[in-house]
Image (spheres, rainbow, N blue to C red):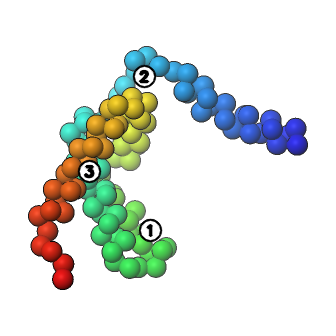
């Protein structure tokens, strides 16, 4: 039981320590994606995910297809997975920033959806 508690505390330590860091003290990553680029990339990723889900492929095939499609999304947005993850991590520590980014993403997807013809 004590070992389990120690393991849990060791696993949670990095999370707890990172929460102590104040957002204004965090240095932006070298390859931080600007908000507009991140919004566009997230919209494309969510649309890609929806298309893959709509393909009704088996789970493993859908996962492989999504991974391949995401590579194209990164290429079209002139970035890579590392820059995307670092940017998301940075904006996530600035809660209000990520909320605003996702509000814009939701609005953009909603506008695209509204332009689609109604399905019978």
72 versus 89 height, above or below: below
In the rendered image, residue 19, in percent from the top left (x then y), is placed at 54, 27
Q: Which of marks 2 and 1 is in front?
A: 2
118 versus 4 height, above or below: below
In the rendered image, residue 1, in percent from the top left (x then y), is placed at 88, 43
- Mark 3–mark 2 Cα distance, whole angstroms, equals 24 Å
Please tell me which residue is depicted at 11% across the width and 64% down the height of the picture: 115
Q: Name the residue under label 1.
A: 63
Please tell me which residue is depicted at 30% across the width and 69% down the height of the picture: 51
**Any part of residue 51 in sight:** yes
- Mark 3–mark 1 Cα distance, whole angstroms, equals 23 Å
Q: How crowded is mark 2: few (under 14 residues within 10 Å), some or many (20 or more)?
A: some
Q: Give SS at disc 3.
A: helix
108 versus 82 height, above or below: below
Q: Which of 78 and 89 is in front in this view?
A: 89
**Any part of residue 31 in sight:** no
* Residue 110 picture quarter: bottom left
Q: Mark 2 points at which residue?
A: 23
* Residue 94 picture quarter: top left
Please tell me which residue is depicted at 25% across the width and 48% down the height of the picture: 105
Q: Residue 54, labelled with which disc?
A: none
Q: Mark 3 points at which residue?
A: 106
* Residue 99 picture quarter: top left
Q: Nearer the viewer, residue 79 or 48?
A: 48
């Amino acid at each position: 039981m004590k070992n389990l508690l120690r393991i849990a505390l060791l696993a949670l330590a990095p999370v707890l320590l990172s929460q102590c860091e104040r957002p204004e003290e965090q240095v932006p990553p070298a390859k931080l994606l600007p908000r507009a680029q991140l919004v566009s990339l997230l919209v494309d990723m969510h649309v890609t995910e929806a298309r893959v889900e709509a393909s009704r492929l088996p789970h493993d095939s859908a996962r492989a297809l999504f991974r391949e499609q995401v590579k194209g999304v990164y290429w079209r947005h002139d970035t890579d997975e590392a820059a995307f993850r670092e940017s998301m991590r940075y904006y996530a520590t600035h809660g209000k920033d990520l909320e605003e980014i996702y509000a814009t993403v939701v609005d953009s997807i909603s506008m695209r959806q509204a332009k689609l013809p109604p399905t019978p």
